[in-house]
Amino acid sequence: MKKYIIKLLIVILFFSLAVSCKHLEKQPSSGVSYTQVQKQAFLDTLEKRTFHFFWDNANPENGLISAHYPKNSLSSIAGTGFGLTAYVIGVKRGYVTRKQAAARVLKILKLFWNAPMGPQATDVTGYHGFYYHFLNLRTGKRFKRSELSTIDTTFLLAGILVSRNYFNGSSKVEHQIRALADSINNRVDWKWITKSDSLVSMAWRPERGFSKAEWKGYNEGKLLYILALGSPTHPLGPDSWKKWTSGYDWANFYGYKGVQFGPLFGHQYSGMYIDYKGIQDAYMKKVGSTYFKNSRLATLAQIAYAKQNPKNFAGYGQNVWGLTACDGPGRDTAEWKGKMIKFYGYRARGIAANYDVDDGTIAPTAAGGSIPYTPEKSISALMYMKEHYPGIWGKFGFKDAFNPTYYKAKGKKGIWYDDKYLVIDQGAILMMLENYRSGLIWDLLKEDPVIIRGLKRSGFSGGWLKSVSSK
């Protein structure tokens, strides 16, 4: 009798385990874990595929990179700056040779240096050293009525500085790269586009002049002021940085205190080029933090928000999170869980104490761009999204965005997936992944005279800045 009872208990135990496993297969736990071997293989594949977005989607005649894939007729100058950075990564990882990358970089720099500049509305590429946000992919000239963009010029310049520092060899091509990089950077007239109150205008158009909007307060413009203050020819003064930081909004959001900015790209884009660990300006000294920590806490707040999921969007959790500027299902309205939800196309989605734009659309670049800040959480999220939302993955890694709620709210089956890859969002994934793995981009700019001057004129000190001198 005793043996029979023991056998019966064993059968019941195995049956219970089988039921539990079956349940787990149907509803995968959001707390999944991956082995180091799995993570390494995933990161290798992700980095290579994302690199090839930049390598394969460039105009072979002039080097300009398409703003998105499938290809269209315009090129983003910020995206091309990200591409210049990507080519350096490609050499390090062995995807292309140094000679191949140098030739591609030189072609791009020649275009920007030799391109027509002037105040006219057509047949030009830029003015006063700044470039139009979007260029015709074939001609390299202003695309339609695009604005002369200070922030997009900033990220083009950042890629140019990375190229100058990396291609330091003695060949004729690498000599030309360095000379053109200096010439392009020195031509940018920061004083022309800065008003008397020391703040940089966001844009200029020949049809209407300077934009009333200025760069003030915490966002991706941090790098803009560092380059402007570090300029060897038209530098801004320290008052610009003081005015910039005077617009900061410090608050507690989901238990994490920091300077607020809703979309995660604002916490990532400057950090793709500058290693903010350990260095502080006057503001961060006052609050006892760093910009690196601030970006980390902003990411953790977004993860906490996704886990709590106050709007009850489908899919949200500790491995499905990430609000930033991205594509979306389009302008529409539908009822979801008893509330009317506005859905958007391309929009700067984000969540913070002072910002709330969330329509259930998740962008993998948000997690990818935060890999150095939250490595385990970001990598697990990316792997989970690839596994459980396979429509987001393709030949160039992650497509731009997906929305598990939209079709459900419309009474349809399935998940909305973007059909495009966006150049700027691909750049955040690639650069931050490489910085996490090797620190390559950060290290290349830690000895750059423009960056060092800009940081020191902005009042930064401490950390790795102790070992470098202004040049």
Image (tube, grey):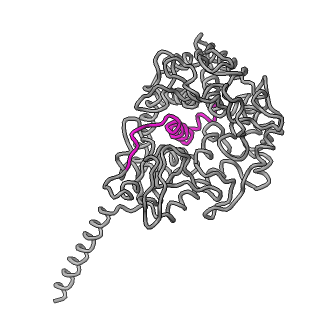
Return the residue nearer the eye: 75 or 294. Answer: 75
Q: Does residue 282 lie above or below 311 as drawn? A: above
Residue 380: say if magenta. no
Left or right, 376 with respect to 168, comes to left
Q: Main secondary structure of the magenta part?
A: helix
Q: Can you name the residue that lies furthest to the top here?
A: 172
Task: Give the image location of residue 220, x and y in percent.
Answer: 65, 41
Where are the magenta residues, as a range? 416-444
Return the residue nearer the eye: 291 or 91. Answer: 291
Does residue 429 appear in the picture of this structure? yes
Q: Which quadrant: the C terminus?
A: top right
Does residue 380 appear in the picture of this structure? no
Q: Does residue 378 lie above or below 9 as drawn? A: above
Task: Give the image location of residue 365, x and y in percent.
Answer: 50, 44
Task: Give the image location of residue 335, x and y in percent.
Answer: 43, 61
Left or right, 248 with respect to 172, comes to right
The residue that appears at 52% across and 30% down in the rendered structure is: 86
